[in-house]
Image (cartoon, rainbow, N blue to C red):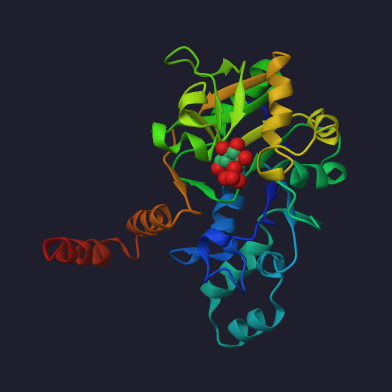
Amino acid sequence: MTILRKALIPVAGLGTRFLPATKAQPKEMLPLVDTPVIQHVVEEAIRAGIKHLVLVTGRGKQAIENHFDVAYELEDVLRRRGKVEDLEQVQGITHLAQFAYVRQGEPLGLGHAVLCARYAIGEEPFALLLGDDVFDPRESALSGLLAAHAATGMAVVGVQEVPEEHVSRYGIVNAGPAGTAYWNVTSIVEKPEPARAPSRWAVVGRYILTPDIFELLVGLEPGAGGEYQLTDALAILARQGRLIAAPIPAKRYDTGNKLDYLKANVEFALQREDLRADFTAYLKELASSL
Ligand code: G1P
């Protein structure tokens, strides 16, 4: 399987779906149990063999840069108190990968965020991971996309089938033949009304992009919501027969959605050795009292 060198993670969004928690802190720092959502996404990229991470940040997002940086005072205190495990955990985050940050001055859409990273990415294929979408870490969400990219050399969108009432939240592609590992995208539409949707196959925050995407983004007019939409550039690739969809079998949580965020916390806690037994007992007791 191809190993990509670089991944791009846009983190400049305002997080208005999670106010008031996101008034003074980035939504990407909200935890699943004790680990910020952004760290789960970074670790997913690293598990796929990616070593260089480019984060597109904006005002008020310094906590993300600090999270992946050395925390000198904290490390000093932990060292002096002999808290070896805590120290190793805090230091480990800094050494996960190489991080580069570019700023998106204005929130002009996902297409614009990707374009901001043009010179940090350069002329090579790269993964794009959106921070709201978190996948079950026991499965590799990116592996099917990487295999499809290795086989075709083309840009790939990771897709999952969603209920009809949810298609207007996503970029939607045409369906492929049932059971295939990947298929050619002939049409992709951003947040369509269900009646206009080509299928119920939604783009779920994982992409492999090729560097020709940047020139396509430069030529875009603002699209849905007045924003520069990545989907509009992908639609050009689709029309040229140069876009692939690959289903992602891993379970997904939309952590930008309150109910999904709560579910993710519960399910991630149940995967933890240190919490599983006590938390399961608590949930059973709670369920029987409802
Ligand atoms: C973005 C993309 C959309 C995609 C979605 C996945 O939308 O524009 O095509 O389906 O992410 O989460 P957003 O959620 O930023 O509105």
Which one is in front, 24 or 64?
24
Please say whether residue 286 is visible from this viewpoint.
yes
Q: Residue at x 42, y 33 (%)?
A: 162
Q: From the viewer's perspective, is residue 249 above or below residue 40?
A: above
Q: Position of residue 80 (x, y in %)?
A: 61, 87
Q: Residue at x 65, y 16 (%)?
A: 151
Q: Position of residue 104 (x, y in %)?
A: 79, 55
Q: Is residue 203 left or right of residue 226?
A: left
Quarter location, residue 208: top right
Q: Is residue 50 left or right of residue 160?
A: right
Quarter location, residue 149: top right
Please say whether residue 205 is visible from this viewpoint.
no
Q: Position of residue 109 (x, y in %)?
A: 71, 46
Number of numbered discs on residues: 0
Which one is in front, 190 or 155?
190
Furthest residue toward left: 288
Q: Residue at x 66, y 39 (%)?
A: 224
Q: Is residue 273 left or right of residue 205?
A: left
Image-quarter location of ligand 1: top right
Q: Is residue 160 left or right of residue 212?
A: left
Q: The N terminus appears in which quarter of the rendering?
A: top right
Which one is in front, 107 or 31?
107
Q: The C terminus appears in which quarter of the rendering?
A: bottom left
Q: Position of residue 42 (x, y in %)?
A: 61, 51
Q: From the viewer's perspective, is residue 188 above or below residue 95?
A: above
Quarter location, residue 47: top right
Q: Residue at x 51, y 54 (%)?
A: 256
Which one is in front, 191 or 114?
191
